[in-house]
Every structure is written in C-alpha cells, then in structure tokens.
Image (spheres, coloured by chain):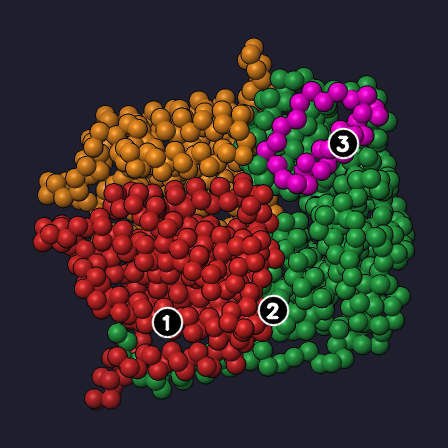
C-alpha cells in the first residue's frame, strides 16, 4: 500500500497539469475557423500522414491562413490508422478545439468511422477515397468524397489499357478482400464485357497480406495476357514485387488499378516497374495549370515532386476553401450547400461535386511506367497516357437519399 | 524455410533463456535493413549477407549484456515488458534512421527472375533462400549436435542447474545463446529483404508467425522448430488457396490446439 | 487504508478540469480493465497476454445489442459483464492447464484467434472498420450524451469496481490466489484445487474486463478492431506493471500514466512510442514495483532526510 501523503501527490499533479495547459478550458476564439487535418503519424499509414499535412498546409498558406477575413486555425491529430483512436481524437478536436471542418483520414475503413462522427457532430468531412460507401450506401449530408468513383477508375483503366494493348484479352485479377476491392472487381468485369475480355482467374487476398507467392503461382499458371491488381499501399507493393520475382513481369503486363502512384512506385525499383500500368487519382505530370503551379511550388520546398497523398490533401483543402468562398459563410451547413454542385478547376482538371451523392466527378489518370533508360530523373516513374471521367451510372448508385441536416 | 529460420532463433532463445523475446521481430527487421544499407554502400550483396547478421548478433550481445542478463531471475511479466519495450525502441529507431517509407531491394542479378521447374515457375531467389536457409539450419544443427559447446547448450535447455553445477559458465552460455538467436533472426531478415522489401512494420509481422512456429515445434526443440516452420509455410499456402479468409485464423487455432494438447510441440519428447 | 481512497476521490473531481471528460472517462475505464488484469497478474501471478479477448468480446456484443436491439444501458452492462466472464471461462479453462511460457503463448494464441475471427467476420463486427454507431442509451431517465454526465457514470462504476476488487483481494479468495502466486505446489499440497482457483481469477478478471469493454464502446460510440487485439492486451499489462502490480492501486496509477502519456505525447512527437519503450525498459531495470515503488522510495528518502 502506498504511504504517500496527499500533499506529495497533489504537488506532482499540479505540476503535470500545468504542463498540459488546461486544454479543456481554452476554447478557440470565436473569430477563428478551426479546420482539423486527421493525418496518421503512427500505424500502417505512418509514412503518409506527414506528407498529407504538407499538402494541406500549402493550400492553407496560399490564402495566408485566412478566409472570409477570418483567421484559420489548422490543427492536426494522429489517427494512428485505427478506427477507435481516429474517432476519439476527431471528437476531442470537435468538442475541445471547436473544429468544424475535418479533412482525412487516409485509411478508407477509418474514414467510414470518422464519417459517422461527422454526421453525429454535424461537422463537414472531406475524405479522399478508397471506399464506395461514403458516396454510396453510407452517404449523408456532411461527408464528401474527393477521389474518383471506383467505376470511373475501372472504366478509365480498362478502356485505356485495351486501347494500348488490344490483343490482351485474357485477364487474371488479384483483389484485396474487402468491400472496395469487390466493387472495383465488379466494375472491371462489367467494362471488360464490352471489350470481350476473358477473366481467366480472380483471386482474393486478405488485407495486409505480405506473402504473395501462392497467388502469383496461381496467376502464372493461368497464362494470362495481363494481370490486374486491385489493392493498395503495402499490399500492392508486395504483390508487384512478387510478380516480378516470379518472372511474370516484364513479360506479362501488370495493371495496378487503384494506385497511389508515386508513394507505391517509389518503393519498387525500375526493374520491377517495367511493364506496369498504373491507374491513379493523381500523378504529378498532370497537364493542368493548377497542377503545374502546385508541383513547382512543392518541388522547390521539398526537393521532390508531390505524390498522391500531399496532392489529395492539397486539392481537398482547396475544394473546402472554394466552398467557403461560394457560401460567403463559415457555417457548416452553408458550406455543405455551397459544395453541392460546386465546380472547380483543380490539379486534376475540372471537378464537379455531385449534389445527390457527394461524389466528386473528375478525371482519373492512367499511366505507363518507364524503363530505367527512359527515366530522366529519380522520380520519373511514368507517363500519363490517358484520363477518363465517366461518372458512375445512376443504376449503380447506392446513395439513394443524401439526407438532411 | 524463412519461418523455420525465425522459429529456430526464437526457439533457441525461449528454450535456453526461458524468456518471451518480443524483440525477435525487430531484430529480424534490423537484419533486413542492415543488409540493404550495407549492400548498397559497398555494392556487394554477398558480403553484406555475411556482415549484416553479424551486426545483428552484436546488437544481440549488447542487449543481453546490458539488459536481458539482469532479468533471468525476474518473472516473465518483466521479461515481456522489457523485450516489448526494446521492440518499440528498435522499431521506432528504424523509422528515425531509415524513414517510414518502405523500399525494395532487388536480389543480385544472377538470382533474378523465375526458374522454370517444369510443373511451375518459381522465383530463382526463393530457391536460393531455401537452399541457404537449409544450409544454415544444417550448420546450426551440426553445431548443436556435434560440438561440445553445442552439447552444453542443449544440456542448458534441459537442465540449467545441472550445467552450472558442472562448472560451466552459465552466464557465458546465455550470452552466446542470445547472440546466436539474434544472428539467426538477423540472417532471416537479410535473406528476406529481396523478397519482402523493407518496411518498418516487417518486424511485428514476422513475430506472430515466429511464436506459432515455436509453439508448434516445442519450446527449445530446435529440430521441431525447423519442421514446424516448414509445415506452417505449406499449410498457409494450402489454406490460402482454398479458404483465403481463414488462413490466419487457422494458424492461431493450430497454435492453440498444439499448446493445449501437446505443449511439447509436435516433435517434443518432454 | 483511507488515504489512497481520498486521493482517488480528489482525482475524480479534479480530472475533468485538467483533461477533456472523454480522456478522463477513458482513464477510469482503463483502470477497471487494469484491476481485472491485475487480479491475474499481480495477485495470482498469471501473465495473461489476452485480456483484450474479454474486453473486446464484451464490447462487440454489448455494442451490437445497443445498436441493433436498442437495449438500455443497464442491460448492456450486464450483458458485457456476462460476455466478459463467459469468454474468460472458456479461455481460462483452456489456459490454466498450462504454465510458464506455454501459458503466456496460449493466452496470446487464443487472443489472436478471437482477433482474426473478428477481423474476418465483417458482417457482424465490421472487420477492420470496426462497429460504428454504438449509441449511449438512457438509464433510469438519465441521458448520457453529455460528456460530463457520462464521466460521472464511469467514475461511479470505477469506484464500485475498486471497492469490489478491494473486498476480493482482502477476502480468503484473495489470500489463496496470492498463495498460489507464491508457491503453487505448496498451495496444491495444502489441499486447494489450484486450477479451479486460477479459473476463478480468470472469470472475475474477465467480468471486470467486460464491464470496461462496454463502457469503452459507449464512450467512443464505436467498437474498433484494436479493442480485441493483442496490442491492447499488452497495453493493459504494461500499464499495470508501470503502475505497480504489487498493489491494488497500481493498475489505477498505471492507467493514468499510460493513457495520459499516449494522448498528450502523440501531438508532441510522432515517434513517442520510442519513449514508451524506454519507459518500459527503465521500469524493468530500476523500478520493478512501478510508480508505486517510485513513490515509496521517494517517501523513504524524504523521511530519512527529515531525520537527519
């Protein structure tokens, strides 16, 4: 039993409290607009959080950290790539710091949980993408999806690849086993029908898989004309690596359907990247004025071109700021209404936010990786060969009613 | 085969030292990172393959000398806390030194690409790893079975008190055992680098499987660890082919069953 | 022993002034979790590396009941305690047959089993995304949506749990468990059915874990997958060890230290787990008794200074 006196512990407690600064008592000044960037610093997406932050800050700095004549208070929280931690910290930011606008997180699964918090707390939530549900089955008035719809992605990828490789009719699919993977798989098969594709195999692997040898063996055994992977991040990198180790690439082309582009490609080597075709929400060689300016600025600040993560954060923040401009108000509901139907010229080109589903209608990029000899500099991974922006057909839309406030 | 190597190192440490070594995964990761760093620095994979695990072994020595050594008498809870804390320190250090982004390391030229085995294609490098790991396992086995020091180690697993009564420096034995365990983790990591690439999370990923292998093979049962590693590798492939979702559940179910039904492992005699 | 109780009561009142009510609630519910874990760890000498199994299972079941079936808070709590105790009975029954490293590995393996089942059974648990939308149902007309009211509720339950645990460890049962920890063979020889008592410790610990699990689900409105992961199991063990497993209040202090540190450190340095690792190492090498030991050593040092 501790025989410490009351006084001792109270003394220590007061000291600790002082260092913590009584956060629950301090509230945001009423003039400030508090925006939360929910970026992961630990966990599976620990490498992405810091660069998300960069992109978001750049967009805010372009306006000198103010909008509508009011100062912007930008706070970040580490979601730890976990649903519990992320929702907790989001709620604390809303309750304790007065955050009314949330951008992030990066993980789609966690984003769904955060989206629920946004609905409950009635704060605006912008999310990049990787799940159909935010603009689909779980849609609601407060959340918006920035990334292209998986349908747009699938159509762009299949159409563009077939244009460049009209004879590659036998496809093998390697799909991450979660709802988003299944959605993209469904759309690829749909679009594939119009090209007369034969799907000689489709294997699902658990999320977070690192041991791909069995899957690649099966793929190789089917003797496909092309292998398409529907996965993300570490899974995609591990898969691509294994496919190369088995000697499948570069003979057989590998399609990374929903890739982050730079972030994944940088983890591979030029040899592994040979004959890889990449579908992505953004690539830094995009030919739009906004992209060019952003890339130039990013490169001068950080020494290398921006990958998908900072670009997405930058674009989402710009979209949010455009919402403030249009609404001429910083009230959440006004900005939501302003975002519905808004049209913006951004790094990807023209974006339009569909009011009925809160899905961003915008181009999706398709690239081809370069062989080592053609690379002009260390990060010159690929060339954009096509874009596509076919929106999700109404009959597939799972968001029947965006709901009210 | 990789599972066998990892299991071997961990089995050694848990068997002789009776410590749940949660840092084993982190040592694996460091082995991989050291290999890539050294290989890129000096431009030679083979030399790096020799040097990197030695680096890990030295790290293991330091860990044992300054930390683990004081904990033999302590309860498992403190050993766990210590090795877990160590694992945290090591993984975060990896991020501090090498950054949070993963990277690839290609196998040396001659081992790249697939080999046509007739019934299937298989990566040349993986075949190499199978052979290399097999040789290592053989070498370890020979050391343990045929040399005097090896015999002392095995005796140490069976009965620590007796060994020290016989006048053998038990402290030295433990230090060498830990360093050897670290070496095995390090070389498993080094061999894995071209297959799995480098990633700060690779340590914890491997650790879970290593514990399963050790449980299946029997704590301290080194041949058992090898066999268990092979079995688990094969089982995982089979289950993944037929029932993807269940593959990890099955592994841990097997582990639990073995611990319950035959705690000495599939091959243990105790 | 009046003094620690007074300290705790004061902390309960002061805490929401210093940190947000949500963090404060988390500290006390984690302390409940720790009390349960420490019954096994500190008092019975069993290092269970799978306490999250009971915590998480209770959270999922209670969460599901509240969300889908619309149960009220009281029933949810009862269900959670039941599930916690029930899962602990199953796990405990299997685990008490082994000891030492085997025991630890078995609790770990079973935890992983539950974890990966929850991971894959996405239709029920939501898998990696967790189970969001857990409401805070009304109890006896009190609406818990207000963070402070919920905090009062959690701290009340904590005090009840603390009192119960105190009674348990001071009862004959508590003495028997400690005897088992000291020397299992002798306890058996004296005539106690050791496996049965170990199982009892599991079940009681599981009940406490279950209670904490339900409170967690209600606090955050979500049952995340990490609540049933072995990392979470590790957290409660480490928090308890840091606080001091040799004392009833160790888990309480440990919960404070652990949760406060993780929350405040994450905004300061992204690599804070390294400091956590260092803290673990320091505790093991120098302060086995945890924070409790630090305090008592400080006291002794102060006392000896006063004398001279």
Position above or below: A220 against A367: above
Tell me the distance, in whole angstroms, between the alpha carbons under discs 3 and 2. 40 Å
Q: CB of mark 3 within 8 Å of CB of mark 1?
A: no
| Left or right: where A294 falls relative to B185 | right
* Mark 2 vs mark 1: in front: 1
- According to the picture, the residue beneath numbered tag 3 turns out to be A188
Asked whether C227 or A346 is in front, the reply is C227
What's the mark number on residue C160? 1
Tell me whether the residue at label 3 lies in contact with that at label 2, contact meaning CB atoms closer than 8 angstroms: no
Q: Find residue C239 and report its horizontal and vertical position in percent.
A: 39, 63
Is residue A194 in the magenta section? yes
Location of mark 2 (residue): A92
Q: Nearer the viewer, residue C116 or C77?
A: C77
Q: Position of residue C171 (x, y in %)?
A: 21, 67
Q: Is residue B215 above or below residue A129?
A: above
Highlighted range, magenta = A177-205
Q: Residues within 10 Å of mark 1 (few under 14, many from 20)?
A: few
What residue sits 59% from the left and 26% below the top? Answer: A215
Colour of chain A as rendered: green
């Amino acid at each position: 039993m501790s025989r410490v006196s009351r006084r001792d512990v109270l003394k220590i407690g007061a000291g600790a409290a002082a260092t913590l600064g009584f956060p629950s008592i301090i509230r945001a000044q009423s003039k400030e607009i508090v925006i939360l960037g929910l970026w992961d610093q630990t966990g599976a997406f620990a490498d992405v959080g810091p660069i998300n932050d960069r992109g978001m800050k750049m967009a805010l700095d372009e306006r000198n950290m103010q909008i509508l004549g009011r100062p912007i208070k930008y706070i970040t929280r580490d979601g730890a790539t976990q649903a519990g931690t992320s929702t907790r910290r989001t709620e604390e930011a809303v309750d304790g710091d007065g955050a009314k606008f949330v951008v992030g997180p990066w993980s789609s699964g966690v984003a769904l949980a955060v989206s629920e918090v946004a609905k409950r707390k009635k704060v605006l939530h912008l999310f990049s993408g990787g799940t159909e549900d935010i603009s689909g089955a779980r849609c609601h008035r407060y959340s918006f999806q920035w990334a292209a719809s998986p349908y747009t992605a699938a159509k762009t990828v299949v159409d563009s690849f077939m244009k460049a490789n009209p004879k590659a009719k036998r496809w093998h699919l390697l799909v991450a086993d979660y709802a988003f993977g299944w959605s993209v798989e469904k759309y690829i098969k749909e679009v594939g029908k119009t090209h007369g594709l034969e799907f000689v195999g489709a294997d699902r692997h658990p999320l977070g898989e690192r041991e791909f040898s069995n899957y690649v063996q099966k793929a190789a055994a089917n003797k496909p004309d092309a292998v398409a992977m529907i996965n993300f991040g570490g899974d995609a990198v591990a898969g691509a690596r294994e496919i190369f180790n088995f000697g499948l690439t570069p003979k057989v082309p590998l399609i990374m359907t929903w890739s982050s582009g730079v972030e994944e490609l940088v983890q591979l080597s030029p040899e592994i990247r040979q004959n890889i075709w990449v579908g992505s929400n953004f690539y830094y060689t995009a030919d739009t004025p906004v992209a060019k300016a952003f890339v130039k600025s990013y490169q001068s600040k950080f020494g290398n071109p921006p990958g998908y993560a900072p670009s997405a954060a930058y674009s989402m923040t710009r979209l949010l700021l455009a919402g403030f401009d249009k609404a001429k108000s910083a009230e959440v509901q006004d900005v939501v209404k302003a975002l519905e139907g808004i049209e913006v010229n951004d790094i990807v080109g023209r974006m339009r936010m569909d009011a009925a589903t809160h899905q961003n209608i915008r181009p999706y990029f398709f690239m081809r990786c370069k062989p080592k000899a053609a690379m002009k500099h260390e990060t010159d991974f690929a060339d954009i060969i096509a874009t596509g922006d076919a929106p999700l057909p109404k009959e597939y839309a799972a968001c029947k009613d965006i709901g009210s406030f | 085969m990789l599972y066998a190597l990892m299991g071997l190192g961990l089995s050694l440490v848990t068997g002789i030292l009776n410590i749940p070594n949660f840092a084993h995964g982190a040592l694996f990761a460091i082995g991989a990172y050291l290999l890539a760093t050294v290989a890129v620095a000096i431009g030679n994979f083979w030399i790096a393959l020799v040097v990197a695990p030695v680096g890990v072994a030295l790290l293991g020595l330091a860990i044992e000398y300054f930390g683990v050594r004081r904990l033999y008498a302590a309860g498992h809870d403190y050993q766990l806390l210590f090795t877990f804390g160590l694992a945290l320190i090591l993984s975060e250090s990896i991020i501090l030194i090498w950054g949070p982004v993963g990277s690839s390391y290609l196998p040396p030229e001659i081992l790249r690409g697939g080999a046509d085995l007739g019934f299937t294609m298989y990566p040349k490098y993986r075949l190499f790893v199978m052979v290399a790991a097999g040789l290592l396992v053989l070498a370890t086995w020979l050391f343990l079975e045929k040399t005097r020091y090896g015999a002392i180690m095995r005796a140490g697993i069976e009965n620590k008190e007796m060994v020290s009564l016989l006048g053998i420096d038990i402290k030295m034995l433990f230090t060498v055992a830990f360093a050897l365990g670290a070496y095995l983790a390090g070389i498993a990591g080094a061999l894995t680098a071209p297959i799995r690439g480098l990633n700060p999370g690779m340590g914890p990923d491997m650790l879970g499987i290593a514990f399963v292998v050790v449980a299946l093979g029997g704590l301290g049962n080194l041949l058992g660890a090898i066999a268990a590693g092979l079995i688990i590798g094969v089982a995982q492939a089979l289950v993944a082919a037929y029932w993807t979702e269940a593959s990890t559940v099955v592994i841990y179910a097997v582990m639990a069953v073995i611990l319950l039904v035959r705690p000495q492992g599939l091959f243990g005699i105790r | 022993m009046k003094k620690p109780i007074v300290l705790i009561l004061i902390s309960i009142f002061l805490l929401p002034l210093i940190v947000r009510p949500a963090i404060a609630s988390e500290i006390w519910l984690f302390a409940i979790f720790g009390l349960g874990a420490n019954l096994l760890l500190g008092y019975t000498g069993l290092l269970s590396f799978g306490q999250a199994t009971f915590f998480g299972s209770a959270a999922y079941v209670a969460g599901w009941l509240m969300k889908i079936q619309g149960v009220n808070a009281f029933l949810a709590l009862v269900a959670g305690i039941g599930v916690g105790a029930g899962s602990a009975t199953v796990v405990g029954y299997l685990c008490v047959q082994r000891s030492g490293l085997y025991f630890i590995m078995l609790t770990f393996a079973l935890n992983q089993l539950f974890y990966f089942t929850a991971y894959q059974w996405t239709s029920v648990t939501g898998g990696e995304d967790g189970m969001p939308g857990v409401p805070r149902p009304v109890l006896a007309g009190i609406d818990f949506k207000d963070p402070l009211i919920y905090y009062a509720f959690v701290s009340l339950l904590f005090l009840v749990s603390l009192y119960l645990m105190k009674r348990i460890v001071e009862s004959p049962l508590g003495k028997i468990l400690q005897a088992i920890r000291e020397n299992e063979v002798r306890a058996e020889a004296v005539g106690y059915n050791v496996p049965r008592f170990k199982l009892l410790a599991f079940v009681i610990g599981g009940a406490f874990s279950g209670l904490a699990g339900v409170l967690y689900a209600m606090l955050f409105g979500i049952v995340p997958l990490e609540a049933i992961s072995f990392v979470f199991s590790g957290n409660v063990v480490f928090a308890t060890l840091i606080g001091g497993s040799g004392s009833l209040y160790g888990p309480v202090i440990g919960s404070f230290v652990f949760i406060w540190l993780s929350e405040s450190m994450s905004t300061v340095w992204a690599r804070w787990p390294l400091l956590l690792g260092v803290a673990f190492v320091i505790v093991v090498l120098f302060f086995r008794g945890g924070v409790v030991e630090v305090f008592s050593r400080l006291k002794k040092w102060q006392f000896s200074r006063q004398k001279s």
